Amino acid sequence: MKENAVITGQQLWEWSQKAKAEAKEADISPREVDGLLQEWVGLDRLTLRLGSFKHQPEINLRLPWPELMQLWERRIKQRVPLQYLTGVAGWRHFGLTVSPAVLIPRPETELIIDLVVALIQRQSQICDHNLQQGHWVDLGTGSGAIALGLASVLTEASIHAVDCSREALAIAQKNAQDLGFADRIEFYQGKWWEPLDFLPGHVSGMVSNPPYIPTAMLSTLQPEVARHEPHLALDGGESGLECIEHLVKTAPAYLHSGGVWLVEMMAGQGEQVVQLLHDQGCYTQIEQIVDLAGIERFVLARRQ
């Protein structure tokens, strides 16, 4: 055991109470203290909730105590996201490796996989075309979250994941390897459709969570986002719609008839995205979809 990698339960409990007070003062959820203890001390949720660890004479730490204190100081003073400090983000039923090279996958994005499942179930009832098979692409894959979600529910499909960042792709590939999907997902470095020039007219579905924040808004975001998450994955240009507009224009060349176009967007962009799709003239069944909080979050369309 490393030096200073052991602490009494009482000491740890006292620190956790102090840290939760610091979190409240900094407008950070006190639950993050438990998240840090789960990852770096190995305590489970029930033990943390009951505080029963307080009575343990000795608790083994996964990091020396001074290092744990430094991590928490970075969270409070520098507003580094907890997920970057622990290197792990929960998303659907996955534990994903993350780093400042990728956006931290959001809970609201999880719904995009459920939308794909619902769409396939509905499709199977009205026609013979099987969206469960064929090629599905995740453009701007980042940590690989969406590609992994697609691979978990589209067991007969070929999944392709693209990102322009070499560092992000390394994270996505590690997640695929760690979670047992390395043989189900092909990864490509490049901008949007460029690495997929062998797929025109053959894609069953395109799913993307592209950059959609207007450039002028980036500095106004929460400090965790504005200071630490990659602007490459956030900045949607002056209007916030530059990347989405590109996907509207380029996807028809790759989607087969009936193919799915499904994109996450920022609240308030729905009508503009719908209009872009209408103006393109080759999409049908265009609809806005709200997330679990009732916020317009996705736009879905089909290739004519």
Image (cartoon, rainbow, N blue to C red):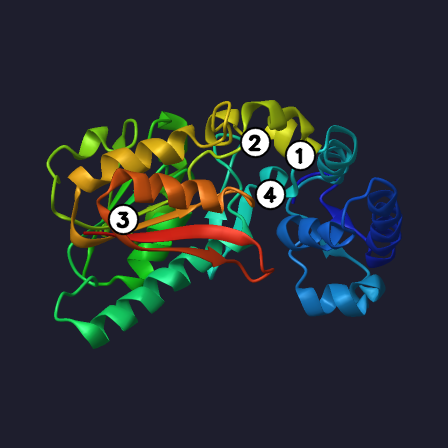
Q: How far is the residue under mark 1 from the one under mark 2?
A: 7 Å
**Could you tell me the amino acid type at mark 2?**
Glu
The answer to whether the residues at label 4 and label 1 have Cβ atoms under 8 Å apart is no
Q: Quadrant of residue 187?
A: top left
* Nearest to the observer: residue 81 or residue 154: 154
User: From the viewer's perspective, is the residue at label 4 or at label 1 nearer?
Assistant: 1
Q: Give the residue at mark 4.
A: 83
Q: Position of residue 46 (x, y in %)?
A: 70, 70
**Could you tell me the amino acid type at mark 1?**
Glu
Task: Determine the secondary structure under disc 3.
Answer: loop
Kindly identify the residue that appears in the image at 72 percent across and 55 percent down: 34
How many discs appear? Answer: 4
Q: Give the residue at mark 1.
A: 224
Q: How far is the residue under mark 3 from the one under mark 4?
A: 23 Å
Q: Give the residue at mark 3.
A: 182
Q: How far is the residue under mark 3 from the one under mark 2?
A: 26 Å
The answer to whether the residues at label 1 and label 2 have Cβ atoms under 8 Å apart is yes
Sequence-first tag of 3 and 2: 3
**Could you tell me the amino acid type at mark 4?**
Gln
Sequence-first tag of 4 and 2: 4
Q: Give the residue at mark 2.
A: 229
**Could you tell me the amino acid type at mark 3?**
Ala
